Each structure stands twice: as structure tokens, then as C-alpha cells.
Amino acid sequence: MLIKTGKTYQIDDRIPSKLLYSVFYNRAIMMVRGYLKTGRRVFVGNNTKILNSSNIIFGKTVTIGKQCLLDGFSSEKIILGDCVKIGAYSTLTSTSHFSKYGKGLKIGNNSAVGQFTEFGAAGGIEIGNDVIMGSYVSFHSENHNFLDASQLIRLQGVTSKGIKLGNNIWVGAKVTFLDGCVIGNNSVVAAGAVVNGVFLDNEVIGGVPAKVLKNIE
């Protein structure tokens, strides 16, 4: 049997039919749940909350795992492209404080993030097509101001440059993306990296803080 999602592949002959039936059954339930929550054909896991779904554009075959929270209250449309998958226990926070309406999140086609992903999207996050990520990845698209020693840090406000990832990127588990960082196309981000800076196409980066480890030819 050929399966078409973000890619076309042949099911391994060793996969038991019992597993296939279980998956198809669960997907059917997720589709019904998604339609009830959004009014659209979206696969939604158990105990997932979607706030202000009218401000979210769902592509084809979007999957949102169980016990996620998606905050659709943002100044721009939340866009989840075709075949986007958000892993279980993930959180999207678009507006973190009433003093500033957040910008939101855009994810391109065939991109997927693992379990326990945190999208701090108040300053804006853009992720391209064909981006795959491990678990426990976090995005922080705002940064606290702290240079005025006469004031409390929490009273000095924030800056918001946003975060941008290009196309065809592999992100390892437990990577942290900080405000203002940019990752070019055809890149790899090693597990555990803390990314704060601008990186070009075709680079492997890693470390704390992240730096270029090698180029992809």
C-alpha cells in the first residue's frame, strides 16, 4: 500500500494489520474531533485546546497531537501549511501580555515539530517548508530589555525581532531559538544548541551559543 502525506512511501510488509487498523481508527476519531473544534478537516488529539480558531488558517491534512494548546489570538493570521504536524503536549502562545498584542506563527508545507514544542510567538515566528524537528524545541521571539540599572528588568519592556527558519531544515531535540535568529535553507541544527544569530544556507550549526560546525556541499 502506498501512503501519501508529506511524502509518498511504501508501508513496510512487517507492519501488522492490527497496528494499521488502530492508526486509521484513531485518525478517524481525530478528524471528527478536529471538525467539531474548528469546523475544518483537521486531525486533533485528545484534550487539545484551540483558541480563536477563526484566526488560524489550516492547510490540508494538518495534525495537532494530544494535550496541545494553540493560542490563535494574534495580530496576524496563524498559518499552518499542508501536512503540518505539531507533536503532543506542545504550546503556542501568541499573546503573552495584554500590553502588546502578539504577532503569531507561520509554518510551511510538510513541516513537523516533535512533542513538547514551545512556540513563544509574540514577536513572530516563521518556519519554512520541509522543516523537521525533534522534541523539546523552544522558540522565544521576544527579549527583555535590561540596560537601565535604575529600573526593574520586568518594567523595561521587551524587543521583538522575530525568528525565521528557511526551507529544508533538520532541528535536533532540545534546541532553543532566541529572538532575532535566522536559519538559512538546507541546514542542520544540532541537538541542544542555543541559537542566537544569523546563519546562512547549507550550514550545520551547534553549541552554546550556536556556531557553524561545517558547511553542507
Image (cartoon, helix red, strand yellow):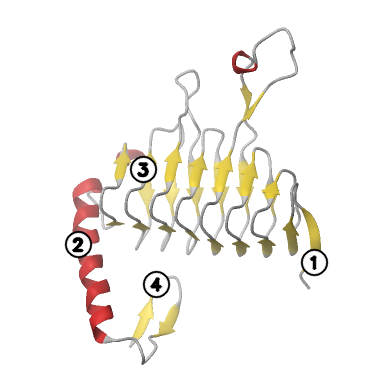
Residue 214 seen anywhere in this rendered image of the structure: yes
Q: Which residue is mark 2?
A: 29
**Gap in angstroms between the C-alphas marked 2 and 1:** 44 Å
Q: Quadrant of the C terminus?
A: bottom right
Secondary structure of the residue carrying numbered label 2? helix
Secondary structure of the residue carrying numbered label 1? strand
Q: Are marks 1 and 3 in contact (CB under 8 Å)?
A: no
**Front in this rendered view, residue 7 or 120:** 120
Inspect the image, locate mark 2, and give the three-letter code of the amino acid beneath it.
Ile
Farthest residue to the top: give it: 150
Mark 1 vs mark 3: give the one in front.
3
Q: Which residue is mark 1?
A: 215
- What residue is at 59 percent from the left and 37 percent from the top? 141
Please report whichever mark, 2 or 4, sits nearer to the chain's N-terminal start.
4
Q: Name which quarter of the figure residue 154 lies in.
A: top right
Q: Residues within 10 Å of mark 3 (few under 14, many from 20)?
A: many
